[in-house]
Every structure is written in structure tokens, then in C-alpha cells.
Image: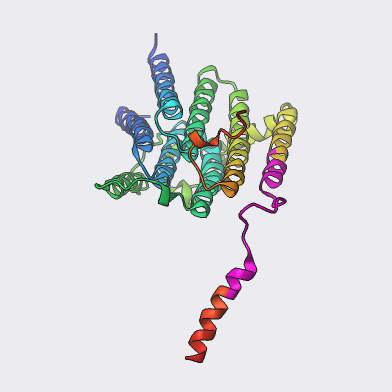
Amino acid sequence: MSVELLFLLIFVFILLIIQIIFLSFMLLAFENPIYSIFTLVLVFFAVSFLLMELNLFFLSLMILIVYLGALIVLFLFVVMMLNIKALELNRSINFFPSIFIGISSFFLLLINDNFQFFGNAGFTLHFFTFTLFNTWSALYFHFASFLNIGFLLYSFGFYILILVSLILLVAMLGAIVLTLNIFRNSNRQTSNDQILQFTKIELINFIK
Amino acid sequence: MTYFDFVFVFMLLVNFLVFLIALGGLFGTRRNLIIIFICIEMVLLSSFLNFTYITIYIDDLYGIVFSLVILGLAAAESSIGLALLVANYRHKAIVSVDLFSTLKS
């Protein structure tokens, strides 16, 4: 690894750290919870890029899959379902979109073709397109971390895997039990009324 | 103290700063439940990053396994918490924590 590449790597590293700290401050500053959820998305993106610089590809991809694919979607779904925005105060100056655009443009800079911040074995972010690997040895070298983690999880650390799966099973059953509609006096979704509401309007339009 | 040690300590301090920010969000003036869940996610994220850096520092793969445990735990925690929020929101349309004290005698 040359000295210039090392400096570039450290520069991107420090930029990502500054971004994480700044965004975690901004996350608390927003009045509307949906803005803070979107800033949480940016924090997780920054963390996944940080781990990708440390050659921990498995963890960075797991953050992208589990946090951004499952947890953030869950948060957004709950915020959408509960209509919380009506309870929040309105802020006069809305500076959220400028922050979002600026930081997403930083990520666009990272996925540039000539931006080569992984020094060893000529590795660039062409990784996402799988066009760079001409030899199998290079491919094995870059997927060795995946292999080692899989070996450790399924041979020596199997009890940890079983424990985590039991925790997730209990969480799933608990969520189902908590949100099941048993009580009569709770506000529930009555699909008959919703369908009738639209059919009345359609009938009125049809008669007109 | 080598260069690598310096970077390691710096990263641990950064994680501690993220942890402190998340704690400030937890015990701050905000009383919205969703913000509190997001702050718990940030706390778990800082511990996750601590485990990964210590993995790199002492060159042992078990830290990655424990960070995967933290990842599963965060998923379980947020699913249970959001289910509680939805179950509470059904009975009374409130997200604020101050008005949740119905179990008090």
C-alpha cells in the first residue's frame, strides 16, 4: 500500500467518523420522528462503509440487510401506521432536505470508478459489479472473512446461534401476542366500514 | 504506543461519544417513544462497533460473533418495543412517555 493511498484511506475514515457524530447529533434535533429515522438510515450507511474500509465485509453487509432492510422499515411502518406527525410541533425552518442531499452526494463520491481506497490486491469498489476478479485466488482472498465467520458460527459457536434464534423466536411470539386483537373496547380496523365508505362514494358517482 | 494503538483508542473514544449522545437522547427532554427506541438502537450500535474494533485489535473472530448477537438482540428489542407502542396506541392515542403511567396506583 502506497503512502498516498494510506492518506486517502485515513481521510475517508475521518470523514465517515465526523459524519456519524454529526448525524447522531442531528438525529436528536429534529422534531418530526420520521426525519430522525431517515438520519438513522444515513448513520447506518456510514457505519457500513466504515466497516467495509476495515475489510469486515460480512458485518457491513449484515448492517445493510438487517438494520436498513428490517429495523428501519419496521420503524417507518409504525410511524406511518400511527399518524404521529399530527402530534408534533411544526418547525418554521426546514433544513432537513439540504442535509440529506449533501450527505448522499458524499456516498455517490465513494462509488466512483477511479476512487481506489482499498490498497491490497487492486481492490476497488468495482466489488459491487464483480467485474474485477479475473483470478480465483483474488476472489478467495477477499471472501476468506466470510468463510472464517461461517466456520466459527457453525462449528464452535453453535450454541450462540441457537441462543440468538431462541431470542428472535420469543420476540416474534411476543410481538404477535401483544398486537393480537382480543379486547372489545380497543380501536381496531373494521374492514367492512372501510369498504362501505368507498362503495357509497362510488354509488353516488355512478348515480350522478 | 504505536500508530495502530492510537487509532484504536481514537475509535473507542468515538464510540463512547456516540454512546453519550444516545444516552443524552434517552434521558433528555424528548418524551417521544420512537425517539427513545432510536436512541436504544444507537447505544447498541456503539457497542457493536466496540466489539468489531476489539476484534481487529486482538485478532480474534469471536468479537464478530458477539456483534452478530448484538444485531439479533437489537432486532428483538425493537420488535417488542414497537409492538408495545402499537398496543398502547390502540387504547389511547398517545405516544408520549409522560402519560403512560397507568400502572401506578
Extreme-top residue of the structure: B1
Q: Which residue lies furthest to the bottom in this view?
A: A208
In the image, taking residue B104 as reference, residue B97 lies left or right, namely: left
Q: Is residue A135 above or below residue A21?
A: below
Closest to the observer, A112 or A93: A93
Q: Is residue A95 left or right of residue A138?
A: left
Q: Give the range drawn in magenta.
A: A171-196
Give the total number of marks visible in the rendering: 0
Residue occupying the point 44% across, 44% down:
A37
In the image, what residue occupies the spot 54% across and 24% down?
A: B51
Q: Is A53 inside the magenta-drawn segment?
A: no
Residue placed most toward the observer, A128 or A102:
A102
A51 w.r.t. B10: above or below: below
Q: Where is residue B27 in the image (x, y as percent from the top left)?
A: 44, 26
Where residue A26 appears, as percent x and y from the top left, is: 34, 36
Give percent across and percent down for residue A105: 31, 48
In the rendered image, which quarter is residue B8 located in?
top left
Asked which quadrant contains residue A12, the reply is: top left
The image quarter in which residue B23 lies: top left
Q: Which residue lies furthest to the front in this view?
A: B105
Scheme of colours in the image: rainbow
- The single residue placed furthest to the left in the displayed view is A93
| Magenta highlight on residue A195 | yes
Residue at x 59% of width, y 75% of height: A196
Q: Which residue is drawn at 63% across and 37% down?
A: B76
Q: In which quarter of the image is the N terminus of chain A?
A: top left
Task: Using the rendered image of the protein, determine whether residue B20 is visible from the camera's viewpoint.
Answer: yes
Question: Eyeballing the image, is B62 above or below B31?
Answer: above
Does the rendering let one see residue A135? Answer: no
How far across and down, in percent of the image, does residue A72 sit? 51, 45
